[in-house]
Image (tube, rainbow, N blue to C red):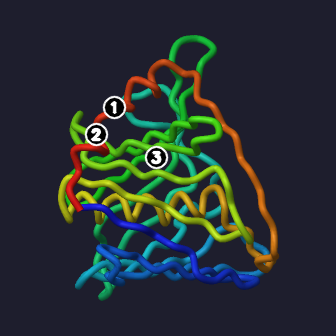
Amino acid sequence: MILKIEQIQKELFSADFRIMHLNEVVGSIHVQGKLGSMEADMEIHFFQNIYKMHYVGGLIKSAPLPNRKGKAFRPYKITGINGETAGSIFQVDQKEGWFTVIGYFEMNYKAHQYNLYPIGFGAEGGKHPVYCEGQQIAQVEKSGEIFNDLHHYNIYAIDQNSAEIAVLFSAYMYINANFKPGEKATRSHVKYTSVTTNKTLKEKYHPDFVGKIQP
């Protein structure tokens, strides 16, 4: 399954996206921030499913990872439309050796663990593999060129369930890196060039994955 997530609006404390599949709208993402906070509440519609995500970290900046060297921070809770808990998502800084720290996103969702590994390819933008239990199930790609502070994501997934996971990761990525509460979108053209050199992260990327995905 191939999806496009297109940002269509950015206001002072909110943002809206539409989710496209085969030129049809199949979902949406609404981000609602507030004065004095970098966090936000999100509502995600994807086909018949509706999810909400909200920050649950309080004033605690980070927490140790169980059974791993590193820390977790910016935790968000994922709930269904009726408030039932579906999972959680957070950012991880994991120690690798004495001087190296690798950063990635982790989601615990419906009894499964998923990880998204952000990998920068310079002018090509970001290509972020999504894994479940050691197998790649999706990839989120984001251009390094941003026009008018509107952000877009392309998702390539092995099936609809994997695409849903990638959509949730994309919403969290926006909050984590691009949401700017208190600022309206302005006419602009910005280029971001990030190049990942860490061997562990680069090994997660498989260049032939996207070519195997059917629309």
Residue 178 lies in quadrant = bottom right
Front position in the image: 39 or 143: 143
Residue placed farthest to the bottom in the image?
82
Q: Amino acid at mark 2?
A: Phe
Q: Amino acid at mark 1?
A: His
Q: For the point 58% across and 29% down, which residue is it? A: 196
Q: For the point 47% across and 79% down, which residue is it? A: 29
Residue 13: horizontal and vertical position, in percent? Answer: 71, 82
Q: Name the element at disc 2.
A: loop
Q: Separation of disc 3 and disc 2 at Cα?
A: 20 Å
Residue 194: horizontal and vertical position, in percent? Answer: 66, 37
- Label 2: which residue? 209
Residue 7 lies in quadrant = bottom right
Identify the mark nearer the N-term, 3 or 1: 3
Q: For the point 39% across and 64% down, which residue is it? A: 168
Q: Name the element at disc 3.
A: strand
- Label 3: which residue? 105
Quarter of the C terminus within the rendering: bottom left
Residue 206: horizontal and vertical position, in percent? Answer: 34, 31
Q: Residues within 10 Å of mark 2 (few under 14, many from 20)?
A: some
Disc 3 or disc 1, which is closer to the eye?
Answer: 1
Q: For the point 81% across and 74% down, which residue is it? A: 187
* 13 lies left or right of 54: right
Residue 81: horizontal and vertical position, in percent? Answer: 32, 86
- In the image, residue 89 above or below residue 18: above
Quarter of the N terminus within the rendering: bottom left
